[in-house]
Image: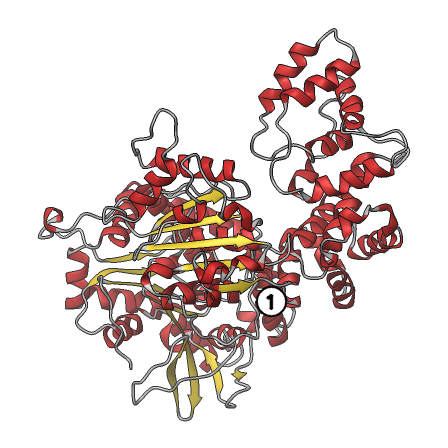
Amino acid sequence: MEIDSISHGIRALSLDGGGVKGLASLLILQRIFRTLQMIEKLPEMPKPCDYFDLIGGTSTGGHISESVFKDNPSSYGRFFNLAMRKPFFRAENLEKAIKDLLIARGIDPEALFKESEESKCKVFVCSTRNIKPAIHNVLIRSYTTWIPTEENYDCHIWEAARATSAAPLFFEPLKLKSCGATFGDGALGLNNPISEVINEADRLFPNADFKCILSIGTGLTDVKGLDTSQLSGGDVIRTCVDLSMNANRQAQAFARGKRGRDMLNNKTYFRFDVDRNIENISLEEWKKMDEIRGLTDAYLGRPEKENELRDCATSLRNGTLSPSSNPETSPAKPTLSSTLPVYSTPNFSGRKAELTKIFTIFQRSEDLHKRVALFGLGGIGKSQIAYEYAKRHMKDRSTFWVRANTLENMEAGYLAIATLLQLEISPYRDNVFLLVKGYLESDQAPPWLMVLDELDDKETMFAQDSNGVEIIDYIPRSQNGHVLITTRDSRIVGLRDGLGVPAQNGIRVGPMPFREALALFRRCMRQELSEEATPRQYRVLLDMLGGLPLALVQAASYMREEEASVEEFTALYRDIEKHESLFHESAINTDREQRSVLFTWEISYKRIAGPTYPHSKSQAAMLLDLLGFLDAQATSTRSFSEIEHDMEGTDLFDICRGFEEALPPQTSPPSLLANINESRLKSSKSAGSIQWYMAGFTAAFVEKSDANTSHGWWWSC
């Protein structure tokens, strides 16, 4: 049905068209959400789709609505550089620019323009149909409409973006593959879609109040700002004049109307539009990006804009700022907490299917069985998917991250939660599991999500704490709680009749499909390097890497830092394959599918080790070898400093023994790096223990000769 329920007031966004000047809209939107981030004290800038119930846009405003540009203004220049190549503007250039941007974001451009199951935001773009003797305005929606007078158009994402931006001065109309309907630029009739946004919101959410209506323009456009060398005929010129004027005229008309006046008075309607000196920039002048940035910064820097930006951000967060509103009568918003690791994944892309499955399973599961397990090979991206899912839901629920590879690390994770929630921890810390479980199962706890990461050993679930209780019994169950587990062991799913995770709640994480793998790979690469490779070269390399995200990132990291081409790296990879026997069985036989991770690591390792490897190696490589045997969390850099001080003046053997005694051993399941190093130990005639690595590294470390020799890029592998 058309009517959607909505528990809060409507928040809607209207984005004008404006060609290259759409950059101003993107910068303004970014500034508003940066302000919102500050007000809500969020760890990163929130996404518009998490706040708005409806977004409508025209032309480049439509592209922003579809998240073609996401929150990255730098992609604007690359887009227009390709789309607006002179002397002739070609539709295929525009299509390629749109598809390239989507791929770079990990979105399949051939995917249908339809909202996902987990999406809370509805999107439409404006277009026109030239049905003589008149031009008719139409909306292309990401959702189904049941309005008798409206049509639902099945189209791909790139087609929707192309249809809303088929400016008659530059590009030919678009014909949809599905139905053959022809579409022209939405700016011809709805360059400012504010009226359509309001009307559509009324149809979707009848009787709901408006909390925030945000309208963003692309600056006033004077006819002098159009490149007349591209024009022919008086009709086209008159169209351009109308196009240049109607966005501001529609904004003024709405603000003068009763509804607009009421919204202005209640501070629920906000209009931002760069109004000075931008009119002389033509719609296609992509080389003036820096000028547009400067004009937008100057506009937002005016003294009166500070309060407007704050009011708009606050309206998005809390609703209206009407004097009649009484916050004391409103229920207090629960305080949300998070122990999510403070690191970002800027190159995360794709995995839409897995993220949607997680959400769907949580929604359909019974109240006390809201548990999902992601299982698959090491390096397949399970933790990254879990992190991305948790990050996306931080606004809705508390998020807790527990490293579950050992009992000790699980206890540390629960202790961090108990400390954050200010629970009464006993002096001996022997009650943290029970404390956290009790609180999260109580009515006091707001909605929450707990991620148990790296639960790769099912025996950990049945390990007993100091009170003799199995850990599986400390995983909380609640109507408001979700538990997400990542594991390499698929047997955890359905174990003990689903006591841990119900059998139907497991999600196998497989290799990335080619399109997603390509998008991730290109996001990690420098643009000029990625553009040098042919589609066939990409296909060959990505097939070899097997769709494992860790292998993809390691390969791209090496190529980025060494300025190696796809063809050159492929040759290096094939050379490593030929010498597979160099790896000990423990490194390659556990998961044959993981060889691409091993091989891409070895390529990076050889670069660090130096030109004389394997006969000798750099101290940076020896440090890497040593780190492979140490626990990832229990070892602090301070330990090294203390050892250096204590060991001065002692012989090498005592130094090695000091390292073994002072540094915590690897307590988690053997890491990939440890397995690789084990193969090197066993293949070395002179090596019989970890001391072989410690001796070489320690000698250089104590003498302080080149202890910091390393290539920064391997940290990103």
The single residue placed furthest to the front in the displayed view is 468
Q: Residue 274's spot in the image, x, y percent?
A: 37, 54
Judge left or right: residue 200 versus residue 524.
Answer: left
Q: Along the line of sight, which residue is nearer the eye, 192 or 556?
A: 556
Please tell me whether mark 1 sits on a helix, a strand or a loop: helix
Q: Residue 454's spot in the image, x, y percent?
A: 55, 48
Q: What residue is at 77 percent from the left and 38 percent from the top?
A: 677
The single residue placed furthest to the bottom in the displayed view is 132
- The quadrant of the rendering that contains the N terminus is bottom left
Q: What residue is at 44 percent from the left and 73 percent from the top?
A: 240
Query: In the rendered image, is residue 367 in sight?
Result: yes
Q: Along the line of sight, which residue is nearer the eye, 37 or 503?
A: 503
Q: Along the line of sight, which residue is nearer the eye, 127 or 600?
A: 600
Could you say which quadrant of the image residue 429 lies in?
A: top left
Compared with 709, 141 (above or below) is below
For label 1, count other residues whose C-alpha is less than 10 Å away and answer few (under 14), some (14-19) or many (20+): some
Compared with 306, 516 (above or below) is below
Q: Along the line of sight, which residue is nearer the eye, 430 or 185?
A: 430
Query: In the rendered image, is residue 63 in sight?
Result: no
The single residue placed furthest to the top in the displayed view is 649
Q: Residue 415's spot in the image, x, y percent?
A: 40, 35
Judge left or right: residue 157 versus residue 676.
Answer: left
User: What residue is shown with label 1?
Assistant: 97
Q: What residue is at 67 percent from the left and 42 percent from the top?
A: 670
- The quadrant of the rendering that contains the C terminus is top right
Compared with 192, 371 (above or below) is above
Q: What residue is at 66 percent from the left and 67 percent from the top?
A: 514
**Which amino acid does the dot numbered 1 rest on?**
Ala
